[in-house]
Amino acid sequence: MPQISGSVLLDTIKAVKTRQGDQEFAKILAHLHGEAKLIFNAPIESWRWYSVDAFVSFLETDIRETADGDRRVLIERSKKVIESQLHGIYKFLVRIGSPKFVINRIATIHASYFQGVQIIPEIEDGPRATIKYIGFEKHHDIMEYIVIGFFLKALEVCGAREISVVFTVPISRGAAYSEVTIAWA
């Protein structure tokens, strides 16, 4: 079963509280069930691994409660979270790197966020790349919006223009892998 780093959960909680406030965060927690309720109502440790299923449940509840179920808002929300993460060493690497360098670096960063998910970047000769994710399950499809936001923001920061980030093999398909295709000018 895929797992996600506690640091991602903590960044997400911080973003929700900053955007919506403590009361709205409490409402989200009140609507969680099962494992997600146990995890998000307990202290989260940045170095521990947590179930991607629980994280997905939290995201689904957040979107249902704060965005009328519109998952697309996660792209902009994740861009804001990623922007805060791109301070320090990540910001330095993104700013000095070409889009291809940044895509390779992001694949490495993503690998540190997940256990049980293999990430394979395939950089092409032109301004194009594909990233395969092996290990996400069909019901983890909300993660597509997070991944799209992450690549969009990182490529914007490094100066790429006309950026396109599309899941050509969506997680929701439930195939052996999902694949995101990235193009830029």
Image (cartoon, rainbow, N blue to C red):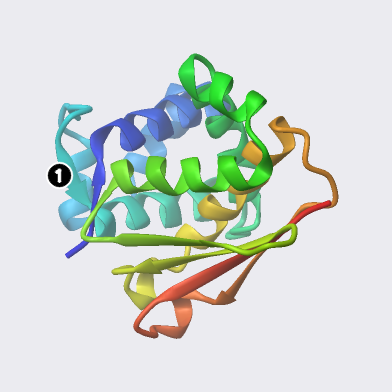
Element class at badge 1: helix
**Against 147, is 142 above or below?**
below
Q: Mark 1 points at which residue?
A: 38
Q: In the displayed structure, does residue 61 sit left or right of residue 112?
A: right
> As drawn, is 135 to the left or to the right of 166?
left
- Whether residue 106 sits left or right of residue 154 in the image: it is left
Of residues 139 and 29, the one drawn nearer to the viewer in this rendering: 139
Q: Which residue is drawn at 33% across and 29% down?
A: 10
Which residue type carries mark 1? Leu
Closer to the camera in the image, 40 or 88: 88
Q: In this view, does 137 lie above or below 6?
A: below
| Quarter in which the N terminus is drawn | bottom left
Q: Mark 1 packing: few (<14 Cα in 10 Å), some, or many (20+)?
A: few
Please state the horizontal and vertical placement of residue 42, each as a whole percent of the image.
Answer: 15, 32
Is any part of residue 150 visible from this angle?
no
Q: Residue at x 34, y 50 (%)?
A: 31
Q: Which residue lies furthest to the front in this view?
A: 125
Residue at 34% x, 83% y is: 176
> Quadrant of residue 118 in the image?
bottom left
> Is residue 95 visible from the viewing direction of this image?
yes
Image label count = 1
Q: Where is residue 37 in the image (x, y as percent from the top left)?
A: 21, 47
